[in-house]
Image (tube, rainbow, N blue to C red):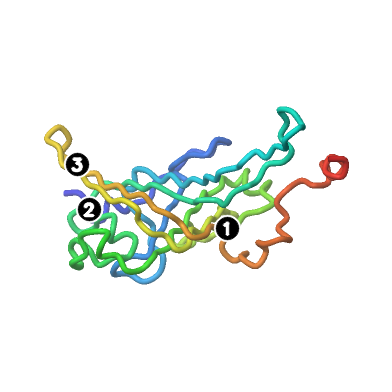
Amino acid sequence: MAEKNAINRVGTTPNTRLVNTHKVKVYGFSDVESGLIQIGLIQDWSPSDSRSNTPVRGIGYGDQIAEIAVGPTDITASCGIMAMYLKNIMQIFGFKAGSTGIVRSLKHHRWPFDVYEEIVLPDFAASKASNSQTSMAISGLGRSTGNKKALATYYEGCWMNSYARGYGIGDVSVNETCDLIITDVYEPGRQAEYGEDLDDFNTANQSAAFANS
Protein backbone atom coordinates (compact mmCIF):
# COMPACT_ATOMS: atom_id res chain seq x y z
CA MET A 1 0.00 0.00 0.00
CA ALA A 2 1.32 3.44 -0.87
CA GLU A 3 2.39 5.65 1.99
CA LYS A 4 -0.41 8.11 2.80
CA ASN A 5 1.81 11.17 2.36
CA ALA A 6 3.40 10.07 -0.89
CA ILE A 7 1.81 12.99 -2.71
CA ASN A 8 3.88 15.39 -0.58
CA ARG A 9 7.25 13.85 -1.37
CA VAL A 10 9.81 16.10 -3.02
CA GLY A 11 11.81 14.80 -5.95
CA THR A 12 15.07 15.81 -7.58
CA THR A 13 15.23 18.35 -10.39
CA PRO A 14 17.93 18.43 -13.09
CA ASN A 15 20.31 21.40 -13.02
CA THR A 16 20.14 23.24 -16.33
CA ARG A 17 20.67 26.80 -17.51
CA LEU A 18 17.03 26.89 -18.59
CA VAL A 19 14.37 27.64 -15.98
CA ASN A 20 12.67 24.37 -15.04
CA THR A 21 9.06 24.47 -13.79
CA HIS A 22 9.97 21.89 -11.13
CA LYS A 23 12.06 24.62 -9.48
CA VAL A 24 9.20 27.12 -9.40
CA LYS A 25 7.50 27.16 -5.98
CA VAL A 26 4.23 29.00 -5.37
CA TYR A 27 2.94 29.65 -1.85
CA GLY A 28 -0.34 30.84 -0.36
CA PHE A 29 -1.73 31.42 3.11
CA SER A 30 -3.73 28.29 3.92
CA ASP A 31 -7.27 28.26 5.29
CA VAL A 32 -6.24 26.16 8.30
CA GLU A 33 -2.44 26.25 8.68
CA SER A 34 -0.38 29.24 9.77
CA GLY A 35 2.20 30.93 7.57
CA LEU A 36 2.92 30.46 3.88
CA ILE A 37 2.24 26.95 2.57
CA GLN A 38 3.52 25.65 -0.77
CA ILE A 39 0.65 25.01 -3.16
CA GLY A 40 0.46 21.37 -4.25
CA LEU A 41 -0.84 19.98 -7.55
CA ILE A 42 -0.59 23.41 -9.15
CA GLN A 43 -0.91 23.06 -12.92
CA ASP A 44 -0.50 26.65 -14.04
CA TRP A 45 0.78 29.89 -12.55
CA SER A 46 0.97 32.78 -15.01
CA PRO A 47 1.57 36.30 -13.65
CA SER A 48 1.60 39.11 -16.20
CA ASP A 49 1.94 42.88 -16.45
CA SER A 50 0.30 45.19 -18.97
CA ARG A 51 -0.07 48.92 -19.50
CA SER A 52 -1.22 51.26 -22.24
CA ASN A 53 1.48 53.52 -23.65
CA THR A 54 0.18 56.39 -25.78
CA PRO A 55 2.30 57.99 -28.55
CA VAL A 56 2.12 61.80 -28.48
CA ARG A 57 2.52 63.84 -31.65
CA GLY A 58 2.30 67.55 -32.45
CA ILE A 59 0.44 69.29 -35.28
CA GLY A 60 2.79 70.57 -37.95
CA TYR A 61 5.66 68.20 -37.17
CA GLY A 62 4.73 65.45 -39.59
CA ASP A 63 4.29 61.80 -38.78
CA GLN A 64 6.69 61.84 -35.88
CA ILE A 65 6.28 60.70 -32.29
CA ALA A 66 7.52 63.33 -29.86
CA GLU A 67 7.16 61.32 -26.68
CA ILE A 68 5.48 58.22 -25.26
CA ALA A 69 2.98 58.85 -22.46
CA VAL A 70 3.44 55.86 -20.18
CA GLY A 71 0.21 54.66 -18.57
CA PRO A 72 -0.39 52.83 -15.30
CA THR A 73 0.45 49.15 -14.94
CA ASP A 74 -2.11 46.41 -14.39
CA ILE A 75 -0.72 43.30 -12.67
CA THR A 76 -2.71 40.09 -13.09
CA ALA A 77 -2.20 36.35 -12.80
CA SER A 78 -3.96 33.13 -13.64
CA CYS A 79 -3.74 29.97 -11.56
CA GLY A 80 -4.91 26.41 -12.08
CA ILE A 81 -4.83 23.38 -9.80
CA MET A 82 -6.13 19.83 -9.71
CA ALA A 83 -8.89 19.89 -7.10
CA MET A 84 -8.88 17.50 -4.15
CA TYR A 85 -11.72 16.58 -1.84
CA LEU A 86 -10.12 18.34 1.13
CA LYS A 87 -8.46 21.25 -0.69
CA ASN A 88 -9.70 23.49 -3.48
CA ILE A 89 -8.29 26.61 -5.11
CA MET A 90 -10.08 28.98 -2.74
CA GLN A 91 -8.72 27.15 0.30
CA ILE A 92 -5.10 27.36 -0.88
CA PHE A 93 -5.44 31.15 -0.86
CA GLY A 94 -6.87 31.23 2.66
CA PHE A 95 -10.65 31.16 2.27
CA LYS A 96 -12.79 28.91 4.46
CA ALA A 97 -14.25 27.04 1.51
CA GLY A 98 -15.00 23.48 0.50
CA SER A 99 -14.31 21.07 3.35
CA THR A 100 -13.45 23.81 5.87
CA GLY A 101 -16.17 26.41 5.39
CA ILE A 102 -19.17 27.77 3.49
CA VAL A 103 -17.42 30.03 0.97
CA ARG A 104 -18.59 28.92 -2.47
CA SER A 105 -18.46 32.02 -4.68
CA LEU A 106 -16.49 35.18 -5.37
CA LYS A 107 -19.36 37.10 -3.77
CA HIS A 108 -18.34 35.55 -0.43
CA HIS A 109 -14.79 36.97 -0.62
CA ARG A 110 -14.33 39.87 1.79
CA TRP A 111 -10.53 40.07 2.07
CA PRO A 112 -7.57 40.14 -0.33
CA PHE A 113 -4.75 37.61 -0.10
CA ASP A 114 -1.03 37.40 -0.90
CA VAL A 115 0.97 34.97 -3.06
CA TYR A 116 4.68 34.23 -2.79
CA GLU A 117 6.74 32.84 -5.68
CA GLU A 118 10.23 31.39 -5.81
CA ILE A 119 12.43 30.27 -8.65
CA VAL A 120 15.02 28.09 -6.93
CA LEU A 121 18.44 28.48 -8.54
CA PRO A 122 20.86 25.62 -9.21
CA ASP A 123 24.11 26.02 -7.30
CA PHE A 124 26.15 27.02 -10.35
CA ALA A 125 23.63 29.75 -11.22
CA ALA A 126 23.27 30.98 -7.63
CA SER A 127 27.01 31.63 -7.42
CA LYS A 128 26.73 34.04 -10.35
CA ALA A 129 23.46 35.73 -9.37
CA SER A 130 24.09 39.17 -7.90
CA ASN A 131 20.54 39.37 -6.57
CA SER A 132 18.96 36.36 -4.85
CA GLN A 133 17.60 35.26 -1.49
CA THR A 134 17.84 32.13 0.63
CA SER A 135 15.19 29.75 -0.64
CA MET A 136 12.23 29.27 1.70
CA ALA A 137 11.33 26.24 -0.40
CA ILE A 138 14.48 24.52 0.85
CA SER A 139 14.67 25.83 4.42
CA GLY A 140 10.94 25.20 4.90
CA LEU A 141 11.52 21.48 4.37
CA GLY A 142 13.89 21.31 7.33
CA ARG A 143 16.96 20.95 5.15
CA SER A 144 20.20 22.88 5.35
CA THR A 145 19.87 25.97 3.19
CA GLY A 146 23.50 25.76 2.09
CA ASN A 147 23.92 27.64 -1.16
CA LYS A 148 20.30 27.20 -2.22
CA LYS A 149 19.17 30.59 -3.44
CA ALA A 150 16.01 31.74 -5.15
CA LEU A 151 14.56 34.63 -7.09
CA ALA A 152 11.74 35.68 -4.79
CA THR A 153 8.62 37.66 -5.74
CA TYR A 154 5.76 38.72 -3.47
CA TYR A 155 2.31 39.46 -4.92
CA GLU A 156 0.39 41.57 -2.43
CA GLY A 157 -3.31 42.35 -2.14
CA CYS A 158 -4.72 39.86 -4.65
CA TRP A 159 -8.41 39.58 -5.52
CA MET A 160 -10.04 36.91 -7.66
CA ASN A 161 -11.62 38.24 -10.85
CA SER A 162 -12.93 34.86 -11.94
CA TYR A 163 -13.24 31.32 -10.62
CA ALA A 164 -14.22 28.18 -12.48
CA ARG A 165 -14.22 24.42 -12.15
CA GLY A 166 -15.28 21.84 -14.67
CA TYR A 167 -16.53 18.27 -14.63
CA GLY A 168 -16.31 16.17 -17.79
CA ILE A 169 -16.86 12.53 -18.59
CA GLY A 170 -13.76 12.46 -20.77
CA ASP A 171 -11.39 13.37 -17.94
CA VAL A 172 -12.10 12.12 -14.45
CA SER A 173 -9.83 14.72 -12.82
CA VAL A 174 -11.32 18.06 -11.83
CA ASN A 175 -9.56 21.26 -12.80
CA GLU A 176 -10.06 24.55 -10.97
CA THR A 177 -8.89 27.91 -12.31
CA CYS A 178 -8.96 31.52 -11.20
CA ASP A 179 -7.80 34.89 -12.49
CA LEU A 180 -6.32 37.43 -10.08
CA ILE A 181 -5.83 41.17 -10.07
CA ILE A 182 -2.85 42.19 -7.93
CA THR A 183 -2.35 45.36 -5.92
CA ASP A 184 1.46 45.34 -5.78
CA VAL A 185 4.50 43.21 -6.58
CA TYR A 186 8.00 43.38 -5.11
CA GLU A 187 10.99 41.44 -3.87
CA PRO A 188 10.25 40.62 -0.21
CA GLY A 189 12.31 42.50 2.33
CA ARG A 190 13.32 45.24 -0.10
CA GLN A 191 10.14 47.33 -0.35
CA ALA A 192 11.99 50.47 0.82
CA GLU A 193 14.22 50.39 -2.28
CA TYR A 194 11.32 50.99 -4.67
CA GLY A 195 10.41 54.53 -5.67
CA GLU A 196 12.10 57.38 -7.52
CA ASP A 197 15.56 56.14 -6.53
CA LEU A 198 14.99 52.61 -7.86
CA ASP A 199 18.15 51.28 -9.49
CA ASP A 200 16.36 49.56 -12.36
CA PHE A 201 18.39 50.34 -15.47
CA ASN A 202 21.93 50.33 -16.84
CA THR A 203 22.00 54.13 -17.04
CA ALA A 204 25.79 54.31 -17.24
CA ASN A 205 25.75 53.09 -20.84
CA GLN A 206 22.84 55.28 -21.88
CA SER A 207 23.35 58.54 -20.00
CA ALA A 208 24.79 60.21 -23.10
CA ALA A 209 21.79 59.18 -25.17
CA PHE A 210 19.40 60.68 -22.63
CA ALA A 211 21.44 63.87 -22.40
CA ASN A 212 21.37 64.39 -26.15
CA SER A 213 17.68 63.53 -26.70
Q: Amino acid at mark 2?
A: Glu
Nearer-the-camera pick, 208 or 133: 208
Task: Decide which of tag 2 and tag 1 comes sooner along the chain.
Answer: 2
In the image, farthest residue toward the left? 169
Write down the quadrant of residue 133 in the picture: bottom right
Mark nearest the camera among 3 and 1 is 3
Judged from the image, the secondary structure of the residue bearing numbered disc 1 is loop
- Residue hosting label 1: 146
Q: Amino acid at mark 3?
A: Ser
Query: x, y (%) of residue 96?
Result: 25, 67
- Residue hosting label 3: 173
Pointer 3: residues within 10 angstroms few (<14), some, or many (20+)? Answer: few
Pointer 2: residues within 10 angstroms few (<14), some, or many (20+)? Answer: few
173 sits left or right of 149 in the view: left
- Residue hosting label 2: 3
Write down the quadrant of residue 57 in the picture: top right
Q: Amino acid at mark 1?
A: Gly
Query: x, y (%) of residue 98?
Result: 19, 61
